[in-house]
Image (cartoon, grey):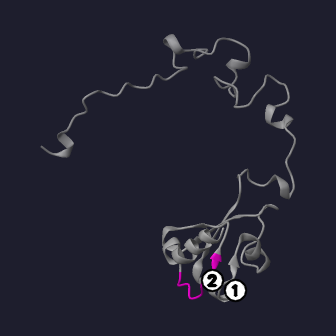
């Protein structure tokens, strides 16, 4: 058997051409006069059409400015722990506020971002991390420091 010998299981139904006499001739199933008989008419009005009224999406006021950014609960920022070596000394505290002051992160749409530390690079210095999310690899690296921090509280 070759490809040209294969026949389809179901024959395709031929498209009925309109305006060629017989049942679908003359008015081609559109009736006589009116909006539906015109060439530009569609079976359904366009999306959002409200029968000649002002469109619903045009009734909503525009949202402009920095406070109308994308609707996200809290913006997120990812930082590799290798970067922390350049900005911090031994035993220093790492918080989102301090990261903002040192220029490692910026406010996004006027909101303080949620900081997550990833295990990119190597951390040489011992740091105390607070109010930052961490990946599993960072938790292992900072494990001893985190345990001592919990005991102090």
Q: Position of residue 26 (x, y in %)?
A: 59, 14
Label 2, secondary structure: give it.
helix
Is residue 136 rendered magenta in the image? no
Compared to residue 99, the image places residue 7 above or below, namely above
- Looking at the rendering, which quadrant does residue 86 occupy? bottom right
Residue underneath mark 2? 83
Check disc 1: other Cα within 10 Å, few if <14, some if 14-19, many if 20+: few
Q: Residue furthest front?
A: 152
Q: Residue at x 56, y 84 (%)?
A: 123
The answer to whether 6 appears left or right of 49 in the picture is: left
What stretch of residues is rendered in magenta? 121-128
**For this view, does 97 lie left or right of residue 141?**
right
Residue at x 63% of width, y 23% of height: 43
Q: Nearer the viewer, residue 22 or 73?
A: 73
* Mark 2 in CB contact with mark 1 (< 8 angstroms): yes
Residue on which the image places disc 1 = 87
Secondary structure under tag 1 reads helix
Identify the residue shown where x is 66% and y is 26%.
42
């Amino acid at each position: 058997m070759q490809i040209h010998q294969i026949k389809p299981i179901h024959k395709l139904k031929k498209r009925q051409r309109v305006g060629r006499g017989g049942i679908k001739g003359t008015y081609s199933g559109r009736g006589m006069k009116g909006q539906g008989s015109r060439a530009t008419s569609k079976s359904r009005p366009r999306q959002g059409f409200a029968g000649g009224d002002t469109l619903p999406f045009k009734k909503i006021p525009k949202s402009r400015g920095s406070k109308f950014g994308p609707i996200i609960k809290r913006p997120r920022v990812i930082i590799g722990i290798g970067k922390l070596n350049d900005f911090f000394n031994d035993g220093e505290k790492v918080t989102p506020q301090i990261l903002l002051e040192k220029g490692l992160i910026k406010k996004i749409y006027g909101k303080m971002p949620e900081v997550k530390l990833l295990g990119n690079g190597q951390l040489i210095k011992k740091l105390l991390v607070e109010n930052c999310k961490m990946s599993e690899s960072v938790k292992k690296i900072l494990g001893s420091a985190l345990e001592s921090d919990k005991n102090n509280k």
